[in-house]
Image (spheres, rainbow, N blue to C red):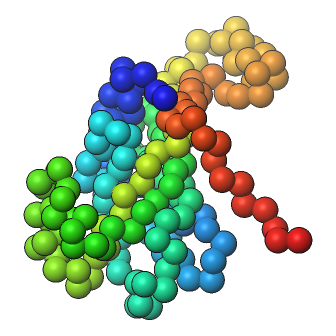
């Protein structure tokens, strides 16, 4: 499990960036469309809460849980974030009434279930990319150092992965 200081770091970065591209990664025929979402809350369990537009199809035809990817970016910020996890569609009235987060419960009740669907994402992996080092050009020495880092570690400087769960991400493989 992720140390509390790392989770707080990710919470702060996600709240700062706020908006993300939401990609459903399941292989079923019906899936939630790719859309821009605005994260309402990141709780202490590493779960993100947000709404997506309600699809035209009946919601009970969709998978209740599925793998997702969110890409956070904000113009003018020197970092961005990619999060992979498992999404859950939250529609059960008892579950909504039992929510600890008052602000989410109020928004769900005010929506009335008409045009938005509440989604909870359990973060499994977060990739943090810091662009501040690459935007400052200190000459050929820094460029050489960055290139050697890329060759040796197969990553770019400023990249830091966070693993939030012990379980591996589900792999999507073709059915034989």
On the image, the x and y values in percent for residue 144 come to 75, 14
Q: Residue furthest bottom?
A: 57
On the image, the x and y values in percent for residue 97 come to 16, 64
Front residue of 148 and 67:
67
User: Can residue 132 be seen in the rendering of this structure?
Assistant: yes
The image quadrant where one finds the C terminus is bottom right
Front residue of 103 and 79:
103
User: Can residue 9 be seen in the rendering of this structure?
Assistant: no
Q: Is residue 28 above or below residue 165?
A: below
Task: Specify the quadrant of the image occupied by residue 3.
Answer: top left
Task: Specify the quadrant of the image occupied by residue 20.
Answer: bottom left
Q: Is residue 20 above or below residue 79?
A: below
Q: Residue furthest right?
A: 176
At a point 20% along the width and 56% down the height, the residue shown is: 99
Q: How many numbered marks appear?
A: 0
At a point 64% along the width and 42% down the height, the residue shown is: 168
At a point 44% along the width and 32% down the height, the residue shown is: 78
83 displayed left or right of 100 = right
Task: Specify the quadrant of the image occupied by residue 11.
Answer: top left
Q: Residue furthest top?
A: 141
At a point 76% along the width and 21% down the height, the residue shown is: 153
Q: Is residue 59 above or below residue 166?
A: below
On the image, the x and y values in percent for residue 151 come to 81, 22
Q: Residue furthest front?
A: 94
On the image, the x and y values in percent for residue 63 come to 51, 74
């Amino acid at each position: 499990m992720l140390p509390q200081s790392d989770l707080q770091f990710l919470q702060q970065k996600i709240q700062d960036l706020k908006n993300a591209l939401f990609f459903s990664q399941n292989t079923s025929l019906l899936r939630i469309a790719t859309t821009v979402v605005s994260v309402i809350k990141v709780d202490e369990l590493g779960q993100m809460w947000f709404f997506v537009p309600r699809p035209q199809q009946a919601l009970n035809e969709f998978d209740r849980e599925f793998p997702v990817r969110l890409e956070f970016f904000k113009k003018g910020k020197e970092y961005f974030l990619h999060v992979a996890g498992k999404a859950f569609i939250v529609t059960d009235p008892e579950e909504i009434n039992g929510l600890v987060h008052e602000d989410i419960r109020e928004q769900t009740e005010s929506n009335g279930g008409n045009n938005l669907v509440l989604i909870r994402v359990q973060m499994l992996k977060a990739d943090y990319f810091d662009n501040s080092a690459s935007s400052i050009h200190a000459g050929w020495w820094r460029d050489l150092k960055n290139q050697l880092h890329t060759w040796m570690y197969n990553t770019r400087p400023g990249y830091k992965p966070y693993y939030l769960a012990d379980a591996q991400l589900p792999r999507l493989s073709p059915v034989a």
